[in-house]
Image (cartoon, helix red, strand yellow):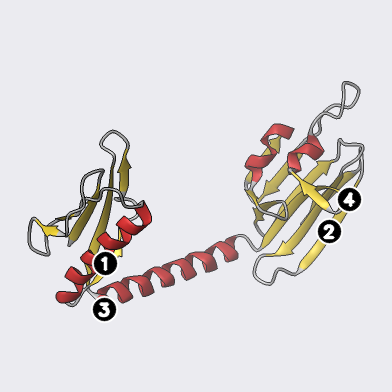
């Protein structure tokens, strides 16, 4: 059951149903700030949903702002609370199962970081050319049947960037080779168990230092 609240640069009118609760509702707002307008629209739609014993759930993908028409269209769905709860529970089960399957197929995680003092910078910096006399270095990753040699500018694509560094999921058998190209930055590699986050290996090196581990 979709309900749309359309907010545009017109004079304020009270909620005006153009169909029954299975259709659309339109609300137009003039000199009212957008957050207030959205709240008014939501409260009105919520009341309509509640009358039928349903809950109003925002459709974030369907809600869009039209620059040409100056209209903010908010889409809500009137959902059965029991059905909604069941869908959420099923989604949580699917996510939990996917996480278990991922951990089973990737029992280890590599975390690569580049640091100076107490701060960290983008990991690829530790592989970049230092100057015309110090060429770039590479990151070599092998995990199961997967193998790739990353150029320094490709290092961000090797895994997921986090506040700690780049996380690279690894299978039961793997190898990683890396070399620091920078004079003032420290290249670090840490291997953890995906489930327990227990550190099983860690090493840091300075310029031209080489890190190599295989399992």
Pointer 2: residues within 10 angstroms few (<14), some, or many (20+)?
some
Q: Secondary structure at mark 1?
A: helix
Q: Residue at x 30, y 48 (%)?
A: 31
Q: Which residue is mark 2?
A: 202
Measure the C-alpha gap from mark 3 to mark 4: 54 Å
Q: Tag on residue 117?
A: 4
Q: Residue at x 31, y 46 (%)?
A: 64
The image quadrant where one finds the N terminus is bottom left
Measure the C-alpha gap from mark 1 to mark 2: 54 Å
- C-beta proximity under 8 Å, tags 1 and 4: no
Q: Secondary structure at mark 2?
A: strand
Q: Nearer the viewer, residue 145 or 89?
A: 89
Dot 2 or dot 3: first in sequence order is 3
Q: Nearer the viewer, residue 98 or 48?
A: 48
Q: Which residue is mark 1?
A: 43
Measure the C-alpha gap from mark 3 to mark 1: 21 Å
Q: Nearer the viewer, residue 49 or 176?
A: 49
Q: Position of residue 175 (x, y in %)?
A: 75, 50
Q: Position of residue 9 (x, y in %)?
A: 26, 43
Measure the C-alpha gap from mark 1 to mark 4: 52 Å
Residue 62 lies left or right of residue 110; in this view the side is left
Pointer 1: residues within 10 angstroms few (<14), some, or many (20+)?
few
Q: Which residue is mark 3?
A: 82
């Amino acid at each position: 059951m979709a309900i749309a609240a359309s907010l545009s640069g017109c004079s304020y009118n009270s909620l005006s149903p153009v169909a029954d609760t299975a259709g659309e509702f339109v609300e137009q707002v003039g000199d009212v700030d957008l957050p207030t307008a959205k709240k008014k629209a939501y409260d009105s739609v919520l009341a309509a949903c509640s009358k039928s014993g349903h809950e109003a759930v925002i459709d974030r993908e369907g809600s869009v702002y039209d620059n040409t028409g100056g209209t903010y269209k908010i889409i809500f769905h009137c959902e059965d609370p029991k059905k909604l709860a069941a869908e959420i529970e099923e989604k949580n089960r699917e996510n939990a199962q996917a996480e278990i399957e991922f951990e089973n197929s990737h029992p280890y995680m590599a975390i690569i970081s580049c640091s100076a003092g107490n701060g960290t910078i983008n990991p690829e910096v530790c592989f970049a050319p230092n100057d015309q006399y110090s060429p770039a270095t590479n990151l070599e990753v092998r995990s199961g049947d997967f193998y790739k040699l990353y150029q320094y500018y490709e290092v961000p694509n090797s895994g997921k960037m986090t506040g700690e560094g780049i996380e690279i999921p690894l299978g039961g058998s793997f190898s990683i080779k890396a070399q620091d190209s920078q004079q003032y930055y420290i290249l670090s590699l840490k291997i953890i168990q995906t489930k327990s986050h227990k550190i099983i290996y860690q090493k840091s090196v300075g310029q031209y230092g080489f890190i190599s581990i295989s399992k």
